């Protein structure tokens, strides 16, 4: 299945290079207008959310288990946030964490995600399309 971009109301900004030397810090960045995409795996069991970390500019990919409440630390599948075509809005319905895969300086050995420590929500806006 093809990636579905989140409706952010913004054009895609140029991407800065990944700041791999940025020290690790558990930082909540709040709700941001970002461009992220979600893709349902072919087996239908997971959804991948892909984008760029707003703190370190690293490419980040998060995987969410479909229909498995309480899986990992990311919480239950967000059934409450459905888009018109019936696919849950994982981009706008979850807290995202930097998972750039780079162990930033000062990252603790027990960190839940390998990245810079940032977390955020993506603000999505209605596209104006009517449900079918």
Image (cartoon, grey):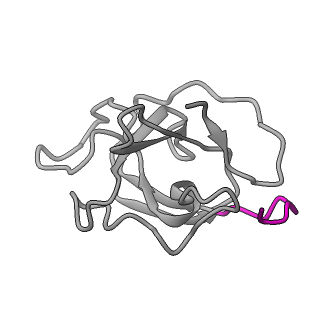
Q: Nearer the viewer, residue 42 or 63?
A: 42
Residue farthest to the bottom, as pictured: 80
- Which is nearer the eye, 37 or 11? 37
Quadrant for the N terminus, please.
top right
Q: Is residue 41 left or right of residue 33?
A: left
Left or right, 5 with reference to 81: right
Left or right: 41 as drawn, with respect to 122: left
Number of labelled discs?
0
Give the quarter of the figure containing the C terminus.
bottom right
- Looking at this view, name the residue that lies furthest to the front: 132
Report x, y in % for residue 80: 51, 75
Residue displayed at 44% across by 55% down: 96
- At horizontal 77% and vertical 37% (from top left) the residue drawn is 12
Height in image: 92 above or below 35? Answer: below
> Magenta residues: mostly which secondary structure?
loop
Q: Residue furthest top?
A: 17
Q: Toward the viewer: 129 or 38?
A: 129
Image vertical order of residue 86 relative to residue 113, above or below? below
Q: Quadrant of residue 109?
A: top left
Q: Is residue 130 magenta?
A: yes
Q: Tell me what residue is drawn at x 40 percent, y 30 percent.
A: 21
Q: Is residue 19 above or below residue 6?
A: above
Query: Quick one: which residue is furthest to the left in this view?
Result: 110
The image shows residue 22 at horizontal and vertical percentages of 42, 38
Q: Is residue 117 magenta?
A: no
Q: Magenta region: which residues?
A: 123-132
Q: Position of residue 13 (x, y in %)?
A: 77, 36
């Amino acid at each position: 299945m093809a990636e579905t971009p989140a409706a952010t109301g913004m054009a895609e900004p140029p991407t800065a290079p990944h700041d791999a030397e940025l020290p690790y810090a558990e930082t909540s960045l709040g709700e941001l207008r970002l461009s992220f995409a979600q893709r349902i795996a072919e087996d239908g069991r997971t959804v991948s959310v892909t984008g760029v970390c707003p703190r370190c500019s690293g490419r980040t990919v998060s995987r969410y288990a479909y229909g498995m409440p309480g899986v990992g630390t990311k919480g239950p599948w967000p059934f409450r946030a459905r888009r018109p075509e019936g696919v849950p809005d994982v981009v706008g319905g979850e807290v995202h964490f930097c998972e750039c895969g780079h162990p930033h300086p000062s990252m603790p050995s027990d960190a839940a995600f390998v990245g810079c420590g940032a977390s955020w929500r993506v603000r999505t806006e209605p596209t104006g399309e009517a449900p079918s």
